[in-house]
Amino acid sequence: MMRFSHFIQTLAFALVPCHAFAATVPGIADPTLAGMPDGTTASSGDVAPDHSPVLFPGVDLSTMTALSFHVTGSVSHTPSPSGLSPDGGGNIGFESFNGISGGYGPINSLLGVFLTDDAPNTGPAPSALDFSSAASRDFASLSPELKQVFFIGDGLNSSGDFQSFIVPDGATRLYLGTLDGNGWYNNSGAFEVTLASGLPDPAPVPLGASFPLLIFGLASLRIFKRPCPQKAI
């Protein structure tokens, strides 16, 4: 049964201006610098804050169970002559730094990493995820660990449906970056990322039987899967 808090928060996502949940992610955004103070270094000359990933704004992750995204734009790496889409190109791997995992997947693709309020280098890095195959990227939902870098790409599976990214317990921050093998500092281009939907945590207050019909009506207006206007903050 639909619950009151779930309904109210979902409706709130529909009514809040889309640009409140949007970010521009430059190609130089190294995910292994997420949550680290100025002066922290990572791969081949990358340094915070110049090459830090982008903190996704506006979303209270403590109230969310899952997120979906709409992504556009392109990113280039040296010596790539032209930009690649958020799904990236040929596969490459990168190393773990600062307590954040490494990873493997399409170069220049859009990546994410969830953190708590703590600095990530206060504990060991989780295992690296491998998104090198098409099947590994064609998921309906993904449940990354804290500090575990994960593939977002364009946010859609092969059927054109929005993918769901499960928020790990304790997460308070989501950082967005790109995938490179080393030295993000000489990349170019950017991705525009907006929140396509956010699934709030359920609450124990049930709604009447008529409210699921209202939710169905809202869904028919594509509130849950509408791409927001591409206006980043």
Image (tube, helix red, strand yellow):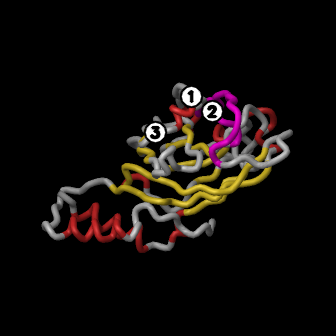
Q: Find numbered disc 1 in the image and state the secondary structure of the residue it sits on.
A: strand
Residue 229: horizontal and vertical position, in percent?
57, 69
In front: mark 3 or mark 2?
Answer: 3
Which residue is labeled 1 in the image?
130
C-alpha gap between disc 3 and disc 2:
14 Å
Q: Which mark is residue 139?
A: 3
Lateral position of residue 142 relative to residue 180, left or right: left
At 49% from the left and 51% from the top, the residue drawn is 160
Label 2 CA crowd tier, 10 Å (few <14, some 14–19, many 20+): many
| Tag 2 and tag 1, C-beta contact below 8 Å | yes
Q: Amino acid at mark 3?
A: Phe
Lateral position of residue 81 relative to residue 172, left or right: right
Secondary structure mostly seen in magenta is loop
C-alpha gap between disc 3 and disc 1:
13 Å
Residue 65: horizontal and vertical position, in percent?
37, 49
Please tell me which residue lies in front, 137 or 128. 137
Which residue is labeled 2 in the image?
105
C-alpha gap between disc 2 and disc 1:
6 Å
Lateral position of residue 150 relative to residue 164, left or right: right
Whether residue 38 can be seen here: no
Figure quadrant of residue 182: top right
Q: Amino acid at mark 1?
A: Asp
- Write down the region rendered in magenta: 86-108
At 53% from the left and 50% from the top, the residue drawn is 155
